[in-house]
Image: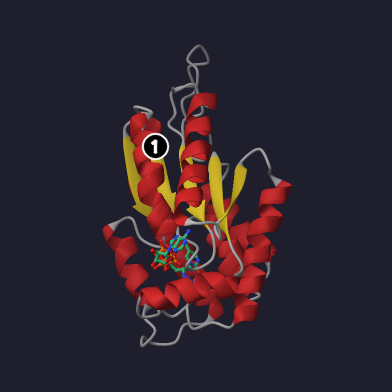
Amino acid sequence: MIDQTQPSLEANDGTRHDAERGAFIVLEGIEGVGKTTQMAVAQRALEQAGKALVCTREPGGTAAGEALRSVLLDKDGAPLSLEAETLLMFAARANHLHEKIRPALNRGDWVLCDRFTDASYAYQGAGRQLGVARIAVLEKWVQAELRPDLVIVLDADPELALTRAKNRGPVDRFEQESLDFFHRARQVYLDRAKDHPERYAVIDASMSLEDVTAAVEATVSGFARQWGVS
Ligand code: Z5A
């Protein structure tokens, strides 16, 4: 019999929903906008806010997830159907949530993740044109009610972002896509941010490195203050 006198620590998504839960922060944006660079900036700002922090990425974040990442990003690997690619993204995510993200949030740690489900909306849903409705079905199944508390979208014109990415080094399977693909992906990030302004912050990633860094620091510190941390 359920003890009705005790407050429930878990909702049906397996994540506690009380004041002690950690915050879940995600960095997003199309290829080359500077997520990897700004992950380090956000990490530093959050550590200064004094919370235990788990930094992770998608696809990946667990042993199985990193193995799936190799399959998903290998430009010389076996071809994947769109459905298979999408399901593998969510398979990696399900494992990531189970092994790393939910346990961390339930301990009260904060989680900072380089990409999450917005990338599935942008890349598979819009870029590859699977449609956002099918991503929403998988999101509901794999995450139930869990959503990031803050999504920082680094936004830049695809021509600029892809030039930066190409100057940096060899391309992966996604980086071979057309400009139209990245325009569609960018638009979905912007649409989602517009639909949920309370959970999204859009930063102009075409600014200088110093200015983008300052904007990310201000966003993360402001969020930490709102969450009651510093
Ligand atoms: N993917 C998906 O399809 N579906 C999903 O559900 C998920 C992911 C979760 C992961 O690749 C791929 O998986 C991704 C989407 C797909 N593919 N794409 N495209 P990844 O993690 O390896 O790659 P990425 O996430 O796209 O990030 P990246 O290639 O590492 O780029 P970045 O992190 O955004 O940029 P960066 O490396 O920090 O910066 C790029 C260069 O620009 C570098 O030389 C910097 O020094 C420079 N830079 C950065 N900021 C500036 C500014 N402000 N000014 C000038 N230069 C700058």
Relative to 36, 179 lies left or right: right
Q: Is residue 147 visible?
A: no
When the figure is inspected, residue 216 is found, relative to residue 109, above or below; the finding is: below
The residue singled out by tag 1 in the image is 45
Question: What is the image's colouring?
Answer: secondary structure
Q: Quadrant of residue 128?
A: bottom right
Number of numbered tags placed on the structure image = 1
Residue 150: percent from the left, percent from the top?
54, 41
Q: Quadrant of residue 144?
A: top right
Q: Is residue 50 visible?
A: yes
Depth check: give the residue in front, 140 or 37: 37
Q: Amino acid under label 1? A: Ala
Report the residue that reaches farthest toward the top: 5
Beta carbon of the mark 1 residue lies under 8 A of ligand 1:
no
Locate ligand 1 by image quadrant: bottom left
Residue 25: percent from the left, percent from the top?
47, 43
When the figure is inspected, residue 105 is found, relative to residue 142, above or below; the finding is: above
When the figure is inspected, residue 46 is found, relative to residue 34, above or below; the finding is: above
Secondary structure at numbered mark 1: helix
User: Within 10 angstroms of label 1, few (less than 14), some, or many (20 or more) residues?
Assistant: some
Q: Residue at x 36, y 42 (%)?
A: 43
Q: Residue at x 61, y 41 (%)?
A: 199
When the figure is inspected, residue 179 is found, relative to residue 119, above or below; the finding is: below
Q: Residue at x 46, y 30 (%)?
A: 16
Depth check: give the residue in front, 193 or 8: 193
